[in-house]
Image (spheres, rainbow, N blue to C red):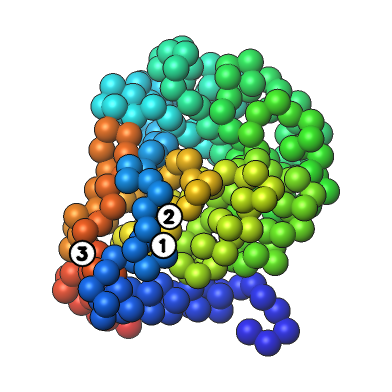
Amino acid sequence: VRGHFGGYALDAIAGLDIALWDMRGKLLGQPVWQLLGGLRHERLPVYVSGLPGATKEERAALGKQWMDRGFSALKFAAVVADEGEIAEIEAIRQEVGPMPKILADLHWRYTALEAIRLIERLCDYDLYLAEAPVAPEDLAGQAQVARSVSTRIGLGEEWRTIHEYLPRLQARCMDVIQPEMAHTGITGFRRICELAQPFHCEVMPHATINIGIAQAASLHVAATAANFVMHEYQHSIFDRNKQYIRSTMDCGAGYFRLPDGPGLGAEPTEEVLSFVLGRG
């Protein structure tokens, strides 16, 4: 990684970092959260991410089903809002009622001015958070949006180090950071959460898209972070991939359950190892 601090090389280092924390916990007979200083949150609130329906009405109905199962927050994606984000949030709000939190993932689609106009209209439906409104490299645009809207701005799933977070924290580009464990590793994730504290930024970690090892690591660090508020629950990935790990980690009624046992409390099964090795 000489000469730069980004890219997929950092993802590989993140994986090694997670493995070393797991090994240390197992050698000492302690869970990773204990190695990190102990629990601040025994229960980890979540928001439901992803409503896989063909129409806005189907997606809104799915949102209502999740709320009926004890969840209290959900996020819709702009890329699947085929009738536009305003129609999407209107349908969801009408279906779920006034209480649940609604988040919108804008997927870096807009200029700063476009994002400001859109977010203010979404706020008519009590938008809780707008995620990734402008291009990830547009620091000035990120700051402009955050200054101009009346709801939270969330950023960070694509960044890997404190060096990407720091200038944006200093410029007040966001109210919520969304670190991705598979990019940062446990050590980097923890540093990012601590860095955000004096800027009064909340932590809402990104859902890790893998078999569940990085997800377990993300939960361990989130449980120890003073500024943690909610974790993303990507149900279509997490629920499917539970078959590939041995762990008590689970999600239900609005909360993640921390895995039990030393280290991460999550082990890949022989089936997934055979699958991965077979592909090689």
Residue 216 is situated, as x and y percent measured from the top left of the image, at 33, 59
Q: Position of residue 223 (x, y in %)?
A: 39, 52
Measure the C-alpha gap from mark 1 to mark 2. Answer: 7 Å
Amino acid bearing label 1 = Gly
Q: Are marks 3 and 1 in contact (CB under 8 Å)?
A: no
- Is residue 114 at least partly visible in the picture? no
Residue at 44 percent across and 17 percent down: it is 99
N-terminal label among 1 and 2: 1
The image's mark for residue 261 is 3
* Mark 1 closeness class: few <14, some 14–19, many ≥20 residues within 10 Å: few
Mark nearest the camera among 3 and 1 is: 1
Residue closest to the eye, 16 or 136: 16
Which corner quadrant of the image does residue 69 belong to?
A: top left
Secondary structure state at the residue bearing disc 3: loop
Q: Quadrant of residue 271?
A: bottom left
Q: Residue 98, image x and y in percent?
A: 47, 13
Q: Residue furthest front?
A: 37
Horizontally, residue 233 falls left or right of residue 8, namely left
Task: Name which of mark 3 and mark 2 comes first in the sequence.
Answer: 2
Residue matched to label 2:
224
In terms of secondary structure, where does tag 1 sit?
A: loop
Q: Which residue is labeled 1 in the image?
A: 37
- The amino acid beneath tag 2 is Thr
Q: Is residue 14 left or right of residue 71?
A: right
Q: Is residue 129 left or right of residue 44?
A: right
- Gap between marks 3 and 2 measured at Cα: 16 Å
Residue count near mark 3 (Cα–Cα under 10 Å), binned few <14, some 14–19, many ≥20: some
Q: Please report the residue visible at 67 percent of the width from the left and 50 percent of the height from the top.
A: 198
Residue closest to the eye, 263 or 122: 263
